[in-house]
Structures are given as structure tokens and as C-alpha cells.
Image: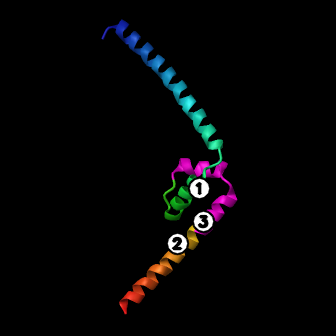
Amino acid sequence: MSELALQANSQDTESFACKAGSYSDARLERNMDQNDKKPSFGQVVLSTLAAAIGVQSNKNRERDFKGGSFKAYIAAGIIFTTLFVLTLVLVVKTVLSNMG
């Protein structure tokens, strides 16, 4: 390639990098704004379920710790645990009653 073509190519790359950088900065600011919001009821429920089986993304974990209410997650955890135990009791009773 000629020197002129290489210069033009490097200028295009620098221009693209600047545009990509500003796009990335805009996305980062938008994500920070979203993280400052309080998680919705559905997000609290999904976070509780994800925590119960141990598959929580780092992004969601950070959102929960930054904007979530401690009381909401405790209440969701207690409700989930209660429903889980009651479901297990019901399943065991049903299986045992069908066995004889």
C-alpha cells in the first residue's frame, strides 16, 4: 500500500475510534442513569430467583446493591423460601400418599 493510503486509513481509524469512544461514553452514562433507579418489582423477583440458584450477572448484582432496598430483597427472599418449602412439603405428601 502506498504511504498516502496508509495515512488515510489511519485517519479513518482514529475518526472511528473517537466516534466509538463517544458512543461508549454515552452508553456508560445511560447505564449509570439506569443503575441509579430503584429496581422494579419484577427485577427484585428475578434477582431473588437468580440468587436462589446462584446465577446472577455482575451487572444485575451491582444494580441490586446500588439502587435496591435491603428490605425488599429480604422480604422477597423470605417469601421465596417459604413458597419453596411449602412446595416441597406438598410434593412429598403427594408422593407418599400415592405410594400406599
- Residue 41 lies, in percent from the top left, at 60, 54
Q: Amino acid at mark 3?
A: Gly
Instruction: Work out whether mark 3 precedes mark 1 in sequence or the reverse, and give the earlier one.
Output: 1
Name the residue beneath numbered marker 2: 84
What secondary structure is found at the residue carrying circle 3?
helix
Please name the residue shown 40% across and 10% down the image: 8
71 to the left or right of 59:
right
Q: Is residue 58 above or below residue 22?
A: below
Looking at the picture, tell me which residue is in the foreground, 42 or 53.
Answer: 42
Q: Amino acid at mark 1?
A: Val
Looking at the picture, tell me which residue is in the foreground, 100 or 11.
Answer: 100
Cα distance, mark 1 to mark 2? 17 Å
Q: Amino acid at mark 2?
A: Phe
- Residue 37 lies, in percent from the top left, at 65, 44
Q: Is residue 70 magenta?
A: yes
Name the residue beneath numbered marker 3: 77
Residue range (magenta): 57-79
What secondary structure is found at the residue carrying circle 2?
helix
Name the residue beneath numbered marker 1: 44
Instruction: Work out whether mark 1 precedes mark 2 in sequence or the reverse, and give the earlier one.
Output: 1
Cα distance, mark 3 to mark 2? 10 Å
Instruction: Work out whether mark 3 precedes mark 2 in sequence or the reverse, and give the earlier one.
Output: 3
Please name the residue shown 41% across and 88% down the image: 96
Q: Is residue 19 above or below residue 73?
A: above
- Residue 78 lies, in percent from the top left, at 62, 68
Q: Which mark is residue 53?
A: none
- Residue 20 lies, in percent from the top left, at 49, 25
Looking at the picture, tell me which residue is in the foreground, 45 or 64.
Answer: 45
